Image (cartoon, helix red, strand yellow):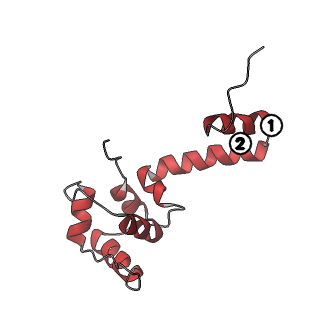
Amino acid sequence: MARKRWYLTEWREYRDLSQDQLAEKVTALTESWEKPVRLTGGDVSKLERNKKRRFNQDQLEAFAQVLQCESPGDLFYSPDEITEIRRLVDKIVKRARPRDMQFLRVLAGEEDKPEVA
């Protein structure tokens, strides 16, 4: 299975951080973790260019926290996509119509598609 693309560069730029600043913040954040994430700006550059092939869950969680993402999964979408996804979900939730909620349950695989009359 191919690895999903992640949008580290876009999120870093969205938060107006340099590669060195991001590396410093991630390193400082994780200093007390069981497995601290120690990075340099060069490491961030390699991750952004997919030259460093692997990243682990600790790195993903640290980047998400420093970049103020709601979840690590946000890093697999651009900041613009996340904004649009949240806008649409908020719009649906505010309307809170039963068919909207049913549609979301169908999309999530929690309910079968309703029969059309």
Residue at 31% from the left image edge and 74% from the top image edge: 23
Left or right: 110 in relation to 73: right
Residue at 52% from the left image edge and 50% from the top image edge: 82
Q: Which residue is mark 2?
A: 92
Expressed as whole percent of the image width and height from the top left, the position of residue 58 reads 39, 69
User: Which of label 1 and label 2 is nearer to you?
Assistant: 1
Expressed as whole percent of the image width and height from the top left, the position of residue 105 reads 68, 39
72 up-or-down from 35: above or below: above
Left or right: 109 in relation to 62: right
Q: Which numbered marker is on residue 39?
A: none
Q: Which numbered marker is on residue 98?
A: 1
83 up-or-down from 34: above or below: above
Q: Residues within 10 Å of mark 2 (few under 14, many from 20)?
A: some
Expressed as whole percent of the image width and height from the top left, the position of residue 89 reads 65, 45
Specify the quadrant of the image occupied by residue 36.
bottom left
Q: In front: 37, or 110?
A: 110
Q: Residues within 10 Å of mark 1 (few under 14, many from 20)?
A: few
Spatial separation of the CA atoms under disc 1 and disc 2: 10 Å
Q: In front: 108, or 79?
A: 108
**What is the quadrant of the N terminus in the image?**
top left
Q: In front: 63, or 19?
A: 63
6 up-or-down from 2: above or below: below
Residue found at the very far top of the displayed protein = 117
Tag 2, which secondary structure? helix
Name the amino acid type tagged 1: Pro
Residue at 26% from the left image edge and 59% from the top image edge: 54
Name the amino acid type tagged 2: Ile
Expressed as whole percent of the image width and height from the top left, the position of residue 2 reads 30, 42
